[in-house]
Amino acid sequence: MTDVEILIRQVWSPDVRPLAEEAWRCYNAGAIRACIASTWTAVTADIITKLVRMADDGDNQAVPFRTTLTEAQSKGLSKDGVRAMQALEATLLDKASEFELIDSIGVRELERIREDRNLCVHPSLRALGDVYEPRPEVARGHLAVALTTLLTHPPTQGRKVIEEFSTYICDPLFVSTLPHIQATFFDRVRTATRSTIVTFAAKHALLELDPAGLMAAVEHADRMAVALLAFAQRDRELVRTAVAGQSERFQVLDGATQLRALVRLGDQDFFWSSVDQALVTRLQGLIRVPVTLSEWEPLPAEITAAIALVRSPFARERLPMLENQFAMLSWTQRLFVAGARPDPYFLPAVIQLVQEAASFRFGEQAGRVLVQHAPFLTLETLRTVLVAWSSNEQCRRASEMTTLAVHLLQGTTHLGPTRAPVFGEFLTNVRAIEGTSDYYSYPALEQALSNVGYNPSV
């Protein structure tokens, strides 16, 4: 499938899509004049459809256009009706620019299509009896321009799409669905509007600006950070530029706001575009374990989340003290840090937590964190942690662990059938110590293995 065919499938209006398809068929058939004429027809139909839609949706500025259109259409195929529609068509590109469906560059590009369409359908415009012979590449280019500039975009551009984006972020039922954010507020908006939206998101994610009282500024910033991550998956350099543009304002914020921004975005390379070495020193000072805290108490939530940034190679590069700080935490504190942001980086620490659990309660806590990290396990690390589990009585005989073993089996489906023998080895090791009739012989795990087609006794 060609790029043009993909774009045609993305045409916003279902009424205009057949016109774009017709233009493409004309091109493929070698009817180049017809292709250009059909492309312009699709452009005019699209602008009219969008302006009428805006009027129907309550845009008072679009109502006069809808009224003029209705009056022209009421005259039918009479001379007055044709003249009225011709006059309306002559203003369409200006109207599209006025309502921010296209920008000034878009007007210029679509104007070229209109001029070539006039040459195609009015051969008398050329002197000396020559007939205009458009080149195939010109027709294809015109169709591609029409699609990318206008036809694939919804009738919400400029200021209005910013308002809709802000409303979406503040929705009480907001769900952090990255593909939806990308499709709605990035993929189908103009390039200039994309930049505006990304800058808007970066500003709120870093600076925690008040969203006009619609919700708490901190929660709003968290949601904007989600949108920023979605946009970064489409154009990382655009996001990097937008974040770097907030550098001066971010540098002078209070420590609490800077720390929350670090937690929010510190695992992303583009975040560090707004951080110079002086601010790095400040951020390192903000990530400190309270000296009054005992080794059995969890760290404050923001300090826990900040130290959990050790999982990111970008954070480790700019904040080299993180690795040493994580290693020096107590058993309980390491457990909470690993549980706050599950990541492959924490697997060695999680295995160590299972090995070192000093009570049944600690064993269960380590088991829950291990289940959180199940998607990151390989066969080798799974075998290692299960050996540690079976060898540590505080894990092996903790009441919740028999259930957690089943959860771990379910959480490692990415390893496929090859994981079953590893769990079978675990059962063998446990039963060599506990016997086969006790609760701690893990009968629930044996049943779960049987359900996936593995018989440990064979």
Image: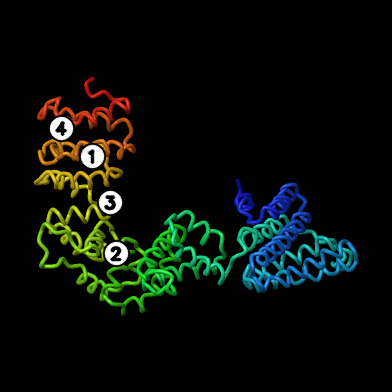
Pointer 1 with pointer 3, Cβ within 8 A: no
Between circles 2 and 4, the one closer to the viewer is: 4
Between 308 and 366, the residue placed more toward the observer is 366
Q: Which residue is mark 2?
A: 263
- Disc 2 marks a residue whose amino acid type is Val
Q: Residue furthest right?
A: 79
Q: Give the quadrant of residue 318.
A: bottom left
Label 4's element? helix
- Disc 1 marks a residue whose amino acid type is Leu
Between circles 2 and 1, the one closer to the viewer is: 1
Alpha carbon distance from label 4 to label 3: 30 Å
Give the residue at x 88% y 65%: 124
Between circles 1 and 3, the one closer to the viewer is: 1
Instruction: Give the mark, 1 or 4, whose residue is nearer the N terminus.
Output: 1
- The answer to whether residue 438 is above or below residue 276 is above
Residue 241 seen from this side: no
Give the residue at x 50% y 70%: 196
Image location of residue 115, percent across then percent down: 76, 67
Q: Give the quadrant of residue 322.
A: bottom left
Alpha carbon distance from label 3 to label 2: 15 Å
Q: Which residue is mark 4?
A: 440
Label 1's element? helix
Alpha carbon distance from label 2 to label 1: 30 Å
- Disc 3 marks a residue whose amino acid type is Asp
Image location of residue 96, percent across then percent down: 67, 69
Residue 386 seen from this side: yes
Q: Which residue is mark 1?
A: 404
Q: Residues within 10 Å of mark 2 (few under 14, many from 20)?
A: some
Image disc number at residue 343: 3
Alpha carbon distance from label 1 to label 3: 19 Å
Between circles 4 and 3, the one closer to the viewer is: 4
- Disc 4 marks a residue whose amino acid type is Tyr
